[in-house]
Amino acid sequence: MNIIIISLLLLASLLPHLTFTAHVNVGIVNGREAKPHSRPYMVSLQTNGQHICGGFLISDELVLTAAHCYGSYEILVVVGAHDLRYSQSSDVIRVKSYIPHPDYIPSTLQNDIMLLRLEKKVKLNNKVRLISLPKKGEDVAAGTLCSVAGWGALWTNGPVNDRLMEAFTTTQNQACCQRRWGSHFFPSQMICAYGSGGSCHGDSGGPLVCGNTAVGITSFVSRGHCNSPERPNVYTKISAYLQWVNKMEKLSDFM
């Protein structure tokens, strides 16, 4: 119950003006438990000891996640975890700098991307690794089989999950995404995907992975149906923000 209450409070504080039928702070439905540490780039963002969002390591001190995952509270980053119940204190790192995209718009979730600079560098090993980003101008084609993962809910309106789950999903045609979501979908900034399983509440900020590359960031899903065929899950298109990410990486030493 506490987890559900925290999720609702987080939603209220992050998106007070959200009126369209999307639900942010999105677990994996119809998925399977991931093989422990098979996705060593995954991190859990937590506040008050509770998982609120996912994220992923792109350097030994930078995490990429969704901008809507940040509010007026401290976020701790758990690295190298599979079952969050057994995370050690050594796996928990404070955030030194929060760097949301300057043009992030909470009411529409445009530019829903954020970098977190960690207080200390992580030690890379078989449980903690980086994931690559797409190259400039490299977009994923419609019909590509990809995957998502997270510690979110296993069903719509369910509680978040302790163990990392994963599911396969397929990228959709941009015109189809536009028809399904209307004015809430921005093709230059977003990707949508649908499969037998997909993201749900608590998976926001986690990566949409195609091959070995993170091409998207989990942003929002249909309010009443976490993996809806009518309104496919929406991800921030990372390739549209590479210039900003690279600039922030270079500036991160001064933040």
Image: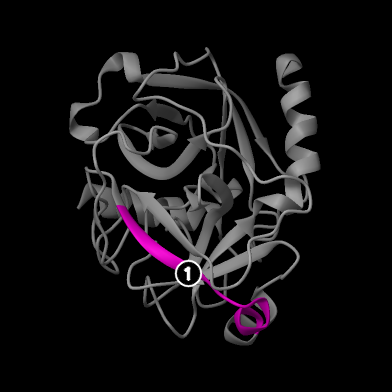
Rendered location of residue 138, percent (x, y): 72, 54
The residue that label 1 is drawn on is 170
User: Where in the figure is residue 114, as x and y percent of width and height?
Assistant: 63, 41
Please tell me which residue lies in front, 4 or 22.
Answer: 22
User: Is 74 on the left-hand or right-hand side of 111?
Assistant: left
Which quadrant of the figure has residue 185?
bottom right
Q: Which residues are magenta?
A: 166-178
Q: Residue 31 appears in which quarter of the rendering?
A: bottom left
SS at mark 1 in the image: strand
Q: Residue at x 48, y 40 (%)?
A: 55
18 above or below 65?
Answer: below
- Compared with residue 180, is residue 222 higher up or lower down, i.e. above or below? above
Q: Position of residue 253 (x, y in %)?
A: 72, 15
Rendered residue at 63%/35% (across/down): 115
**Amino acid of disc 1:** Thr
Quarter of the figure with the C terminus: top right
Residue 249 visible in this rendered orientation of the protein: yes
